[in-house]
């Protein structure tokens, strides 16, 4: 199989927010999708080796920030190229707190707060199926895609 075909699929870009005790953590993901409208549920795929995944599995709650086209590339670097075990990725980043989890505030189209209902082991990743309990949308911003 030509695995390059995967790169032809469109994806959004998102930053997950979670907690490690009282400390904020997060990571970049590109696989978030709506599962059902009633009840409102989504699924997100997170690498098992990612510290954020450990925190989500422990606390069963996370935030999804939908990145906009205007999100500075440095933000993706902060959340994508270092471990939350070693640094607080939210230091110096504008954020809001919603339902006890951090949400990156600047450069997003909106956010969703999610409570984990089911975890599916997919080998290298965990697929979290979660109930959406809260969220907001910010007008006038276009979502960033993986392209």
Image (tube, rainbow, N blue to C red):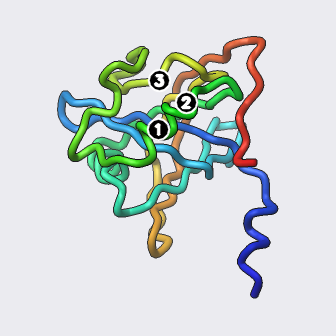
Pointer 3 local density, CA inside 10 Å: few below 14, some 14–19, many at least 20: many
Residue found at x 54% / y 22%: 134
Q: Is residue 90 left or right of residue 2?
A: left
- Tell me if label 3 and label 2 are in contact, CB under 8 Å: yes
Q: Position of residue 140 (x, y in %)?
A: 77, 13
Q: Position of residue 20 (x, y in %)?
A: 23, 38
- Tell me if label 1 and label 2 are in contact, CB under 8 Å: yes
- 82 or 55: nearer the eye? 82
Which labelled disc corresponds to residue 104?
Answer: 3
Q: Is residue 35 above or below residue 140?
A: below
* Residue farthest top in this picture: 139
Earlier in the chain: of badge 3 and badge 2, it is 2
On the image, numbered disc 1 is attached to which residue?
16
Image quadrant assignment for residue 135: top right
Q: Secondary structure at mark 1?
A: strand
Q: Position of residue 95 (x, y in %)?
A: 42, 17
Q: Is residue 99 above or below residue 87?
A: above
């Amino acid at each position: 199989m030509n695995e390059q075909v995967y790169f032809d699929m469109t994806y959004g870009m998102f930053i997950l927010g979670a907690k490690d005790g009282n400390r904020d953590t997060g990571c970049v993901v590109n696989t978030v999708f709506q599962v059902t409208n009633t009840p409102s549920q989504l699924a997100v795929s997170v690498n098992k080796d990612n510290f954020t995944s450990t925190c989500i599995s422990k606390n069963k709650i996370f935030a999804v920030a939908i990145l906009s086209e205007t999100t500075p590339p440095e933000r993706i670097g902060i959340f994508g190229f270092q471990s939350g075990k070693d640094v607080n990725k939210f230091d110096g980043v504008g954020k809001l707190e919603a339902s006890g989890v951090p949400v990156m505030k600047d450069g997003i189209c909106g956010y969703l707060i999610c409570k984990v209902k089911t975890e599916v082991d997919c080998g290298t990743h965990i697929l979290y199926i979660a109930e959406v309990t809260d969220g907001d949308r910010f007008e006038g911003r276009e979502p960033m895609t993986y392209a």
